[in-house]
Amino acid sequence: MITGAATLLAEKGLPGTTIAAVLERTGTPRGSVPHHFPGGRTELLREAVLMVGADVADRLRTAEHRGASPAEIITLICDHFRDRLIATGYTAGCPVWAVVQDAAGFPDLAGTAAEVVDNWTGLIAGTLVPLGYAPASARTTASFILSSVEGALALSRLTRSTRPLDDAADTLSRIISGTAW
């Protein structure tokens, strides 16, 4: 159910990710919800956001441990979303950003999404400090990177093209590498 909820968040956003939609998508019996998620929809969606957050964080940590440069990590993130866009016919964005966009009426979910984004920002910032970025500048730059990638992902969904995401990956990598135009 958690994976199904994350997939629906990526495709339909917060309003379209109802318990009924998750049950239909996953073929799960209705009685499973109160058993596994006594907090109902909010708890299920929170777990979906945390799962996606952990998955992306693990990818970032693995790349960093392998010695990937910040530019290579940007490419890794964009490649992940590019593959997902193509595999879903441009219907799936980022489940975490879906919550960010729609969370005004869901403070618990907004807080969870904020924690995930803060973690991602910190991980990306950590790759920038060895390049000479001051810690505060590294966090600001990491936030800019995430914002750019998520914006490009939204434009890619809209245009049904990976071009905005490819452009973001290329431009951000050039900026971080110091080879921009």
Image (spheres, rainbow, N blue to C red):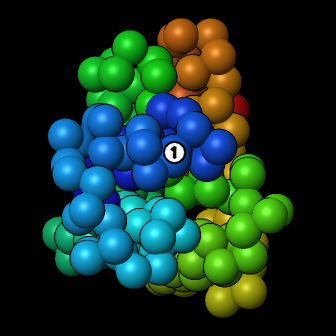
The residue beneath circle 1 is 17
In the rendered image, residue 124, in percent from the top left (x then y), is placed at 50, 71
The residue shown at (82%, 62%) is 104
Q: Nearer the viewer, residue 19 or 129?
A: 19
- Vertically, is 27 above or below 103? above
Answer with left or right where residue 22 lies relative to residue 31.
right
The residue shown at (65%, 16%) is 158
In the rendered image, residue 146, in percent from the top left (x then y), is placed at 61, 56
- Vertically, is 21 above or below 49? above
- Quadrant where the N terminus sits is bottom left
Q: Which residue reaches farthest front?
A: 31
Q: Is residue 44 visible?
A: yes
Q: Is residue 67 visible?
A: no
In the rendered image, residue 122, in percent from the top left (x then y), is placed at 54, 81
- Vertically, is 118 above or below 167? below
Q: Which residue reaches farthest right?
A: 104
Answer with left or right where residue 147 lies relative to residue 33.
right
The residue shown at (29%, 36%) is 25
The residue shown at (47%, 79%) is 39
Q: Nearer the viewer, residue 161 or 47?
A: 47
Total marks in image: 1
Local packing at callout 1 (Cα closer than 10 Å; few below 14, some 14-19, many 20+) is many
- Quadrant where the C terminus sits is top right
Tell me the amino acid under the disc marked 1: Thr
Looking at the rendering, which quadrant does residue 149 occupy? top right
Q: Nearer the viewer, residue 126 or 17?
A: 17
- Element assignment for label 1: loop
Q: Nearer the viewer, residue 20 or 70?
A: 20
